[in-house]
Image: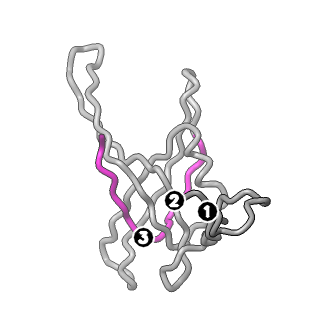
Amino acid sequence: MAAIYEYTGVVEKVLPTQTFASGFSKRDIVMTDDVGQESKWPNHIAFTFKKDNASLLEGVKEGARAKIRFAIDGREWTNPQGQVKYFTDLTGLKLEVLNSDGTSTEPVPAPAEPDFPADAGDVEDMPF
């Protein structure tokens, strides 16, 4: 199983979805360092959201602070001339847009209600 990593930064660009003849689709997002100040040499890091995960980028705005959970994928490809080439992708798995204080903009789920039947009666009568 691949290791999962997290990166927090600022959304620089959300690129359009690309769909290939095979039916495969992907969408890239470019993030920059989240250091709190302008950098002379910022890192521009592209993450690829594949297939259904590409929809996670809908509504994400440039300039927003976000946290991405991703995996590092690598593959080998042999071109028609017989040369072997290696490719590395940062495959996005989840994206969380953050508030200015670093908290998530996603609502916190309410705690689940106990799974007691409505006619359970007194809790003291429970067999456990």
Horizontal and vertical percent position of residue 43: 33, 65
Q: Residues within 10 Å of mark 2 (few under 14, many from 20)?
A: some
Horizontal and vertical percent position of residue 36: 39, 84
Q: CA distance from mark 1 to mark 3?
A: 13 Å
Part of the protein shown in magenta: 1-17
Compared to residue 80, the image places residue 51 above or below, namely below
Horizontal and vertical percent position of residue 55: 62, 48
Q: Which residue is mark 2?
A: 95
Compared to residue 74, the image places residue 47 above or below, namely below
The kind of residue on which mark 1 rests is Val
Of residues 5 and 115, the one drawn nearer to the viewer in this rendering:
115
Q: Was residue 74 drawn as part of the magenta stretch in this picture? A: no
Q: Residue at x 41, y 69 (%)?
A: 8
The kind of residue on which mark 3 rests is Gly
Q: Residue at x 55, y 72 (%)?
A: 64
Kindly indicate whether the residue at mark 2 contacts the one at mark 1 (C-beta within 8 angstroms).
yes
Q: Quadrant of the N terminus?
A: top left
Furthest residue to the left?
Answer: 83
Image side of residue 4 versus residue 122, left or right: left
Q: Residue at x 58, y 33 (%)?
A: 19
Q: Residues within 10 Å of mark 1 (few under 14, many from 20)?
A: some
Q: Residues within 10 Å of mark 3 (few under 14, many from 20)?
A: many
Image side of residue 123 versus residue 36, left or right: right
Q: Which residue is mark 1?
A: 60
Could you say whether the residue bearing mark 1 is in a helix, strand or loop?
A: loop
Image side of residue 76 versus residue 38, left or right: left
Kindly indicate whether the residue at mark 2 contacts the one at mark 3 (C-beta within 8 angstroms).
no
The kind of residue on which mark 2 rests is Leu
Could you say whether the residue bearing mark 2 is in a helix, strand or loop?
A: strand
Of residues 91 and 82, the one drawn nearer to the viewer in this rendering:
91
* Disc marking residue 9: 3
The quadrant holding residue 25 is: top right
